[in-house]
Each structure stands twice: as C-alpha cells, then as structure tokens.
Amino acid sequence: MASGIHVQIGLSSADSCPVSSISENCEIESLTANRHSTPERTEVVGELTVDHSENTEAELNMVDEVFRDDTKSVYRYTHGNDTCPCMRVPNHGCPVRDLRANSGQLILSFITPDLETLRSVVADLRGSCENVTIHQLTRSSAADNGQSLLFVDRTEFTDRQYEALETAHEMGYFDSPKKSNSKEVANKMGISVATFVEHLSVAQTKLLDQILTD
C-alpha cells in the first residue's frame, strides 16, 4: 500500500467559487463538482441541491436550475475560473474527493502523496482564500499497513492559545455546520471576541507550521 495523507481543509472567502456565496444564503443538501479538461479548456462542472425550507427566495447567481419540486431545487454550474479551489487543488495532482459548503465556508477533502505537496496546496490556496484551516489529517503507513495521526508539540502554544483551540473544537466551532460562533466561544472563555480570534489565529498558524514541516 502506498503511503499518503488524507486531508480535510476549510476555506473562507473563496469568492471565486459560486458555491461559497450560495451557501451564505441557502442550505445546501448535497454537492458534487468535477474538473473536466479538453484541448481548448479546463473547467469545473458542479451540481448542488438546495433545501427550500431555509430560504425559498434567495437569488442564486452563476448557476442554472435544472430541477425543482416542493422541497428542493437542483442547480448546475460550469466555470473555468482558475482561482477556484476546485481548480487549484487538482493542479497539484490531488483530485477533490469530497466537497461541502456551509455559511460561506468550503470544506474540501483530498489525498496528497506527501507533506511537500500538502505545503504547496496550502500555500496556493492562501493566495486566493482569506482563511485556510486544516480540519483533519490522517497519514497512511506503508510500513504497518495501517493509519497514524500526525501529532504536534503542545509546548509550542501558550495556555490561552491552546485553550482557544481546544474550546473552539469542543464547542463545534470547526464543525460543518458550525455548532457555535466566535462570540459563544469567547463568552465560554470569558474573553472578548477580538481576543479569542487573535489567540485562535496564532494557534492555528503554529499548528500549521508544525503539521506542514517534515
């Protein structure tokens, strides 16, 4: 069995992806997106299902309705925007295996062969997305034919930074859909939202620095 790393990553402010903006106003039940290439053009073809129970009047841009009933509508979209994460991740030899969207955040899953490729993907995505957050990393092991998680050094974090990361995780801040927001986590910690966001941002940066270093 070849070694590799299964990655789940969250992206905020991915304005180049139509699904990101749609999910800000509508609940997306299901979503598929595939990249197609011809000698003339490479493009993403996607299809999404929107639940009418949340918002039936939302204006959806860049998509065409292909089916509707009393509870849902199915939309299809095609674009060749090379800044879209669905286009950029496969450029590194990592096809997108799963794609979700909620409240403007995209969550992508893919498999990368090594940490060097993962570093390249993250650096590339940071050029077009406001926030890149790794939700989960699982490394397969050719040696023991099993799986092992990647670990980090706890001592690299201050107590408050680690508390922000831990509390946010426990309260479902990173879940999709989110189970808590910045204000709720900050209240739980007894600090301001701005202070929580600062601690969390630094903690996430330190986490990425460790995970994405051999």
Image (tube, rainbow, N blue to C red):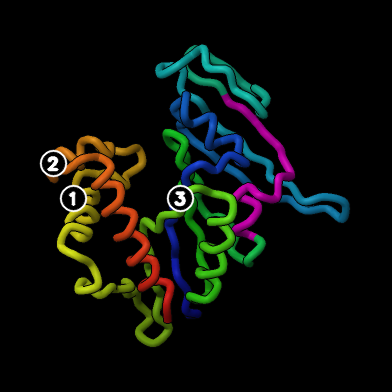
Q: Nearer the viewer, residue 24 or 182?
A: 182
| Mark 2 vs 3, N-terminal side | 3
Give residue 119's position: percent from left, percent from top: 51, 70
Give residue 31's position: percent from left, percent from top: 53, 38
Q: Is residue 197 above or below residue 68?
A: below
- Can you tell which mark lies on residue 131? 3
Residue type at mark 2?
Answer: Lys
Residue to which mark 1 is pinned: 167
- Residue at 38 percent across and 81 percent down: it is 145
Regarding residue 179, the answer to whether it shows in the image is: no
Name the image quarter holding residue 146. Answer: bottom left
Q: Is residue 212 left or right of residue 81?
A: left
- Can you tell which mark lies on residue 188? 2
Give residue 200's position: percent from left, percent from top: 29, 53
Q: CA distance from mark 1 to mark 3?
A: 19 Å
Q: Residues within 10 Å of mark 3 (few under 14, many from 20)?
A: some
Q: Nearer the viewer, residue 208 or 171?
A: 208
- Badge 1 element: helix
